[in-house]
Amino acid sequence: MEDQQEEDGQQEQLTSDGPGKEFEIYIKNEELVDKLKLLNYEDGFLKLGFAYKPILKHYFVRSRNIGEQFFLFTSLAAWLIKKSGEESFSMPQEFDDPNSTLANIMAAAKSKVRIKKAIELKTWSFSLASLRLRFCAMETQRNATGRVSQSENET
């Protein structure tokens, strides 16, 4: 009875979002594969070792071997981190502790976000500083023009 109510609730949630909502994950996975192809993962990632195999367009949606899927996902994440400039990041091994592997990936990803935010803050600071300089220059010019006008009025 309870199972039927849960199933009805899940079905209502799927239909309330629309009939295509349940296929969205397939589209996202296809987009992921397309983006990996743009990064030329066939020549970079797949040639790292024989354990890495081409990713099919629905691999992360319908994989039968969860352990293989996890290893491929973490290896792919590590390769992307290395590709982003952190060459010292080590590739995970198949029998590494999953928690430590994910912790390493998350730490590297967070450091990338912190670096990006720091760069954005420096860019904003630079923009604010240049705006202040422009404002000061305009004020100086306006004051100089005002003084010229005042001196003309006095004579």
Image: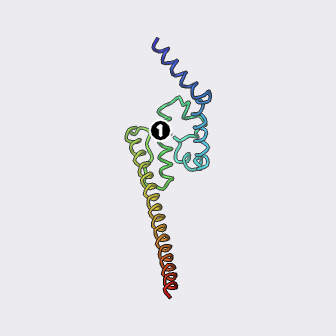
Residue 139 visible to the viewer: yes
Residue 80: give x, y in percent of width and height.
50, 49
Looking at numbered disc 1 in the image, what kind of residue is underneath it?
Answer: Phe
List x then y, in percent, for residue 22: 58, 29
Please report the residue visible at 41 percent of the width from the left and 45 percent of the height from the top: 106
Q: Which quadrant of the view contains residue 97?
A: top left
Taking depth in this image into account, of 91 and 104 the one nearest to the observer is: 104
| Mark 1 Cα shell of 10 Å, populated few (<14), some (14-19), many (≥20) | many
Q: Residue furthest top?
A: 1
Depth check, front residue: 27 or 80? 27
* Observer-nearest of 151 and 10: 151
Q: Which residue is mark 1?
A: 71
Single out the residue that lies furthest toward the bottom.
155
- The answer to whether 92 is drawn above or below residue 133 in the figure is above
Q: Secondary structure at mark 1?
A: helix
Asked if residue 86 shows in the view, the reply is: no
The residue sitting at 55% across, 47% down in the picture is 47
Where residue 149 appears, x then y in whole percent? 52, 81
- Which corner quadrant of the image does residue 34 belong to? top right
